[in-house]
């Protein structure tokens, strides 16, 4: 089935004379001279035409009356129905003409496809087919706007009376946003619906019913064009789709793992401007190829999923969505359940929830689970507050003016328990201030007042033996802060390398301000002077270890290691520059990426959309590798082991999503194995579909040129790549129509045997017609078919030779 981004628009249909004249379709002699030497291998019998609604869309094929013949189904919103076009083995005795056809020269429908009407009570945005109750019959699933998934089951007698509806929220359904296939390797077909924030996965159960939806959190503004096939050749079906962010479209996949679960999103950034895409096994080996039309080059490209050598640095980020919007929160790591594996915890402010991504040993993170929390959580920390080897989740909600603590109990995260703090809480952090093994909560409080009278104070909370948090005691009284502006964030970090965490305040519109800690960990002296840090946010400041503990500050085209000297002045210890005029370093991290002694320095370059990796070579950092970052909305970076292999991984927070670069783990790549440029001029390739359209055992790609309104057939051979086959016009349009052209036509295509001869046919949806081009071959007239693509066709060397389609 072809998948394109084209929208169907009504225009006049002028079918080419060679089609309507009743003759076969063959242009071998002429095309041999025009760059199509293989044209003699292809031919079709006279086109078979069936009238449909001008707005018809989503043609799918399946056996819809259980007679072992392939039929078609198409959405007909103009008449509030789905049209089933049932294949007939022979003509009916009589077929009533369409009395509503007012054309002066009406085109009669071919007898082969018999119309059966399936009424619907709402506009249908997407349609798919598959066996959804394990009875061996093809069923239909469609999405009716605005929020209804409808399952229409085929009965034993070919009736369609059994209908089930499921409400799914936040789905802006479009054609091909609904897809059916086995994605958990249990041989039962499952159902996937692609929504705005989440993709819904409904597994089929052994009793033939669908389970409650599982949420796969989207990482892009829009996802669609879903397909299910085995991409990596492991025998398990994977989910393939495209993601749209702003003006760019990306090819994405979620690979099924050995547990039968779909993994995180793989985004293949080497294709960003595609028009049409489909999947097909071109080389006969395990794993389908990805066939695309590259909108930038107007070429057809055949691509394969390849796995890199294990142990090499991965070339891409694995992305995880949280299903949120633009109002983004923070991300933190910690072991919530005591299994010594770190979880990723992300705040979702808009949804009043916290999403927990549990780690699975040796395989990475799961798809995440939502747990209720405060509304508008803006800051989050994870720390073991009670010494039970299980970390708690501490959240701050400015909207609800509270700090709360959640615990992971009985397989779920509890709702936050609010802590008693007077005043308006602006920011907080967690740290062991006095080295007694117990973590304190340090909070910035706005005590009221205006202008110069406005007071900001620091309070320190400590948990007593009864589990109660106390933010006011004789030895930890609130401290009034003298800051240059309103604080937005607080970071506890050792800025002068004396072994004690200090107070680093990020201010609104001004450089960060430091208050040093005394021997008890309490705020003491304010530090000023030296090299200014600049107006940097918390995502640009990282505590790490190079040769010694360091504070890294990212700005401009460089990363600086800085420290506070004994006079309280900032000094630059070392500076690392990105040699690129477009560089804009927004963050950094330090971790081992090459498996050798010494950690690497990673710069997050949002200007050039790169990760810049500097390798540690005998204590000096040298530029080593760059990785594509894409349009990732970087907020901050942290490091931690997320797949239990003992190596630290890099995590980038992007608000509504985060991305992981797994150290020592290589992820699949999408590599081109063949490409094709049409020999014709003024070409605009819009969509494509693949199959064996001459039954020679080799696949072809049928490409739709919506500029010339023709089909171009492209042959594929593993040793030769893509070769010109033939082309033929689908229809002619009036040249005087000016700007009101016929639009994107033909608008859909598929290849299936709908003529009952076991030979795949080409099927087009064009204007208000379904066009079936029956395959003529192999050996339709008893002729011998060529075996190899590089053999010269008989039609070219002997004009008297019989040609396919003649």
Image (cartoon, rainbow, N blue to C red):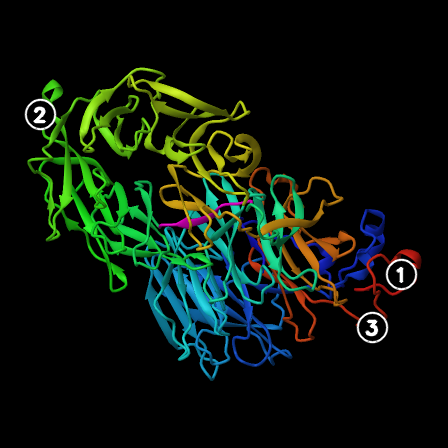
Q: Is residue 349 visible?
A: no
Q: Determine contact: label 1, label 2, CB under 8 Å.
A: no
For residue 500, what is the image quadrant?
top left
Residue at screen point 56% across, 45% down:
313
Nearer the observer, 339 or 416: 339
In magenta segment, residue 570: no
Q: From the image, which quarter does the N terminus lie in? A: bottom right
| Residue that lies at the very extreme toward the bottom in this rendered image | 157
Asked if residue 446 shows in the view, the reply is yes
- Quadrant including the C terminus: bottom right
Q: With 265 as the anchor, is 292 left or right in this view?
A: right
Residue wearing tag 3: 781
Label 2 neighbour load within 10 Å: few <14, some 14-19, many 20+? few
Residue stretch in magenta: 315-322
Q: Which type of secondary structure does the marked residue at label 1 adopt?
A: helix
User: Which label number is shown at residue 574?
Assistant: none
Label 2 sits on a secondary structure element that is loop
| Upstream in sequence: badge 1 or badge 3 | 3
Q: Pointer 3: residues within 10 angstroms few (<14), some, or many (20+)?
A: few
């Amino acid at each position: 089935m072809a998948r394109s981004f084209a929208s169907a628009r009504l225009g006049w249909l002028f079918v080419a004379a060679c089609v309507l004249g009743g003759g076969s379709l063959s242009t071998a002699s002429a095309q041999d001279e025009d760059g199509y030497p293989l044209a003699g291998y292809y031919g079709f019998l006279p086109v078979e035409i069936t009238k449909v609604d001008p707005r018809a869309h989503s043609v799918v094929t399946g056996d819809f009356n259980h007679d072992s013949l392939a039929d078609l189904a198409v959405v007909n919103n103009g008449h509030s129905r789905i049209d089933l076009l049932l294949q007939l083995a022979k003509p009916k005795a009589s077929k009533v003409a369409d009395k509503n056809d007012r054309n002066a020269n009406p085109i009669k429908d071919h007898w082969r496809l018999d119309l059966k009407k399936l009424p619907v009570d709402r506009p249908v945005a997407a349609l798919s087919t598959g066996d959804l109750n394990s009875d061996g019959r093809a069923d239909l699933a469609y999405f009716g706007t605005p929020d209804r998934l409808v399952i229409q089951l085929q009965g034993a007698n070919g009736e369609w009376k059994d209908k089930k509806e499921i409400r799914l929220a936040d789905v802006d359904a479009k054609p091909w946003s609904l897809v059916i296939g086995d994605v958990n390797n249990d041989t039962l077909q499952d159902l996937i619906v692609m929504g705005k924030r989440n993709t819904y996965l409904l597994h089929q159960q052994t009793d033939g019913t669908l389970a409650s939806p599982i949420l796969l959190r989207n990482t892009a503004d829009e996802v669609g064009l879903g397909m299910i096939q085995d991409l990596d050749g492991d025998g398990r079906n994977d989910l393939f789709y495209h993601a749209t962010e702003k003006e760019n479209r990306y090819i994405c996949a979620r690979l099924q793992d050995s547990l039968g679960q779909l993994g995180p999103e793989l985004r293949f950034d080497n294709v960003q401007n595609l028009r049409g895409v489909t999947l097909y096994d071109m080389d006969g080996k395990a794993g389908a190829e990805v066939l695309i039309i590259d909108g930038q080059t107007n070429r057809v490209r055949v691509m394969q999923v390849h796995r890199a050598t294990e142990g090499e640095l991965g070339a891409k980020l694995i992305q995880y969505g949280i299903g949120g919007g633009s109002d983004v929160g923070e991300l933190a790591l910690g072991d919530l359940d005591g299994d010594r594996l770190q979880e990723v915890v992300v705040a979702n402010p808009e949804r009043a929830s916290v999403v927990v991504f549990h780690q699975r040993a040796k395989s990475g993170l799961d798809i995440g689970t939502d747990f209720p929390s405060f509304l508008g959580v803006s800051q989050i920390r994870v720390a073991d507050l009670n010494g039970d080897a299980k970390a708690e989740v501490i959240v701050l909600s400015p909207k609800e003016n509270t700090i709360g603590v959640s615990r992971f109990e009985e397989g779920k995260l509890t709702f936050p328990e609010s802590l008693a703090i007077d005043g308006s809480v602006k920011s907080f952090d967690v740290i062991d201030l006095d080295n007694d093994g117990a973590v304190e909560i340090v909070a910035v409080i706005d005590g009221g007042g205006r202008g110069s009278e406005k007071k900001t104070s620091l309070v320190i909370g400590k948990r007593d033996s009864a589990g109660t948090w106390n933010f006011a005691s004789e030895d930890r009284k609130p401290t009034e802060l003298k800051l240059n502006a309103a604080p937005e964030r607080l970071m506890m970090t050792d800025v002068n390398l004396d072994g004690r965490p200090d107070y680093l305040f990020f201010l609104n519109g001004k450089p960060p301000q430091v208050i040093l800690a005394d021997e008890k960990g309490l705020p003491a002296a304010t530090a000023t002077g030296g090299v200014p840090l600049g107006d940097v946010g918390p995502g640009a400041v990282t505590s790490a270890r190079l040769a010694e503990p360091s504070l890294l500050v990212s700005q401009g085209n460089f990363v600086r290691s800085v420290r506070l000297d004994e006079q309280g002045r900032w000094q630059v210890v070392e500076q690392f520059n990105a040699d690129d005029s477009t560089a804009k370093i927004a963050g950094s991290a330090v971790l081992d990426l090459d498996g050798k002694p010494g950690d690497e320095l990673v710069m997050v370059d949002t200007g050039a959309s790169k990760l810049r990796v500097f390798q540690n070579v005998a204590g000096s950092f040298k530029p080593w590798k760059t990785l594509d970052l894409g349009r990732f909305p970087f907020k901050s970076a942290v490091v931690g082991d997320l797949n239990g292999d003992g190596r630290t991984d890099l995590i980038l927070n992007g608000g509504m999503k985060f991305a992981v670069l797994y150290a020592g783990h290589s992820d699949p790549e999408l590599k081109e194995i063949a490409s094709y440029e049409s020999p014709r001029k003024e070409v605009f390739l819009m969509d494509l579909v693949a199959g064996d359209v001459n039954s020679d055992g080799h696949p072809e790609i049928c490409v739709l040129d919506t500029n010339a309104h023709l089909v171009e057939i492209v042959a594929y051979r593993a040793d030769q790549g893509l070769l010109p086959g033939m082309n033929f016009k689908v229809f002619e349009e009036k040249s005087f129509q000016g700007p009101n052209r016929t639009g994107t036509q033909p608008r859909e295509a598929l290849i299936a045997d709908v003529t009952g001869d076991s030979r795949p046919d080409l099927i087009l949806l064009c204007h208000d017609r379904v066009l079936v081009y029956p395959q003529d071959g192999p050996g339709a007239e008893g002729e011998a078919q060529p075996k190899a693509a590089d053999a010269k066709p008989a039609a070219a060397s002997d004009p008297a030779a019989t040609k396919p389609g003649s």
